[in-house]
Image: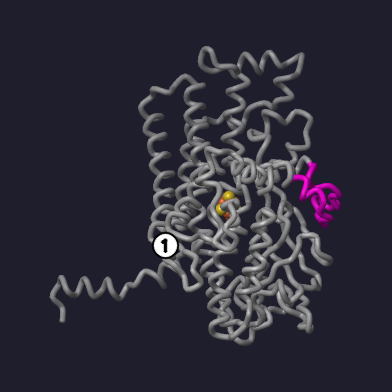
Amino acid sequence: MMTKEQYIESLRKMKLNVWYMGEKIENPVDHPMIRPSLNSVAMTYELAEQPEYQEVMTAVSNLTGKRINRFCHLHQSTEDLINKVKMQRLCGQKTAACFQRCVGMDAFNAIYSTTYEIDQKHGTEYHKRFTEYLKYVQDNDLTIDGAMTDPKGDRSQGPSGQKDPDLYLHIVEVRPDGIVVRGAKAHQTGAVNSHEHLIMPTVAMKEEDKDYAVSFAIASDAPGITMIYGRQSCDTRKMEQYHDIDLGNRQFGGHEALVIFDDVFIPNERVFMCKEYDFAGMMVERFAGYHRQSYGGCKVGVGDVLIGAAALAADFNGVPKASHIKDKLIEMMHLNETLYSCGIACSCEGKQMAAGNYQIDLLLANVCKQNVTRLPYEIARLAEDIAGGLMVTMPSEADLRNKEIGHYVEKYLAGAPGVSTEDRMRILRLIENLTLGTAAVGYRTESMHGAGSPQAQRVMIARQGDLESKKKLAKNIANIK
Ligand code: SF4
Ligand code: FE
């Protein structure tokens, strides 16, 4: 396994084509805007090195027999699925941000089982190729951007119905030695911090869409790839002189990028689906299922930090004993643990796939994510309630540090006795960061749309919920023949 330092160095060696705010970023690793998100990924390496987290953060590879980072693992049991969720909660607690590496892990497990089934039907050799690829990923302890979401253009049309054919990523040429692809993947979590992109189709497809039914892996710095780094609310605070307090979370963050593939060549050994449109839906459903389980871990870990911050804000305000405050904190914990329960439940009910790895219960994973589209919003609302308006009206760190007016900030922003004004500002800024700032991307809007928007889960719940069997139960009880 790589150490945290080795991971950072390995990325520094790559020649990534990254853009931010209209400028090409020559050194993304050390860029102040990007670095906090890289620190979050680095945490997945750092924790794996620590003996107390071995069980949760690492696993023994079924492919090589070697101990590997769990983020590279194919789940071999329901216990593995449970440990995955625990690992994500832990990483969320340590970063209070999206640590990005789960998309790769979820893609590995979905592609591994789907390629096995494609080969069974079509006599292809994708599973063997993918297994070899995954050994390479595991041996080198890589971070992979599991990429699904296409830009999608006109939502009333599928891939082949678009005016601009590139709005879904597609195959433009099949050569004897590989394929050439064009298109883009949007909202790519951790793209700039990843060694490779692992591409999957974004929707179920019909025969006319077959050029869009494609899965492959490619190094992030391959010719033809451009990454445009996404803006986040309050992001430029990172570029300010005084940003320690004002950022709320100076060290960690997450990111998404628009990743463009401009006629990129993919050698055959890296192609895992090539026009088998009848399996696009299966791959989508499985990846989405795993990632919906993931949110029952990562968002819970970040929620733990937010609840802790709200409780500290109450302490610093001198009202930890107020009964309504206590009740709000209880409610926040109840909601957060409800999400965790869903993550654990869909893991416990997991099943072995034909390929041998384990998959979560799809119905429960979708219920998990559907709850994630709601409960973090209520947790955030309660945190804002407890924090008070100062969270969004407070003067800056630059004011606090100013020789002429700093003493005013110090004096008038004081809270409970024995609490420094600076600490009070720090905790309020952390709540601001998680609910309205850079981390709100991961905790709020991503809770809504990440791993699929709410309606996508409702479609799956409808499909998996088996309404007919419930009708039968009612008929039996009501004695209807
Ligand atoms: Fe992992 Fe959560 Fe970020 Fe997805 S949103 S990559 S599950 S931390
Ligand atoms: Fe996500």
Q: Nearer the viewer, residue 288 or 71?
A: 71
The x, y position of residue 158, in whole percent, is 62, 78
Q: As displayed, is residue 155 above or below residue 423?
A: below
Kindly identify which residue carries mark 1: 350
The x, y position of residue 366, in whole percent, is 45, 62
Can you see residue 445?
A: no
At x 67%, y 80%, the residue is 274
At x 57%, y 41%, the residue is 435
Q: Is 190 placed left or right of 418 in the picture? A: right
Q: Nearer the viewer, residue 181 or 131?
A: 131
Q: Nearer the viewer, residue 245 or 362?
A: 362
At x 58%, y 52%, the residue is 67
Span colored in magenta: 8-31
The x, y position of residue 323, in whole percent, is 35, 27
Q: Is residue 28 magenta?
A: yes
In which quarter of the view is residue 225 placed?
bottom right
Which part of the image, by quadrant, shows the C terminus? bottom left
Q: As displayed, is residue 449 above or below residue 171?
A: above
Q: Is residue 381 magenta?
A: no
The x, y position of residue 181, in whole percent, is 76, 75
- In the rendered structure, which amino acid carries the disc numbered 1? Gly
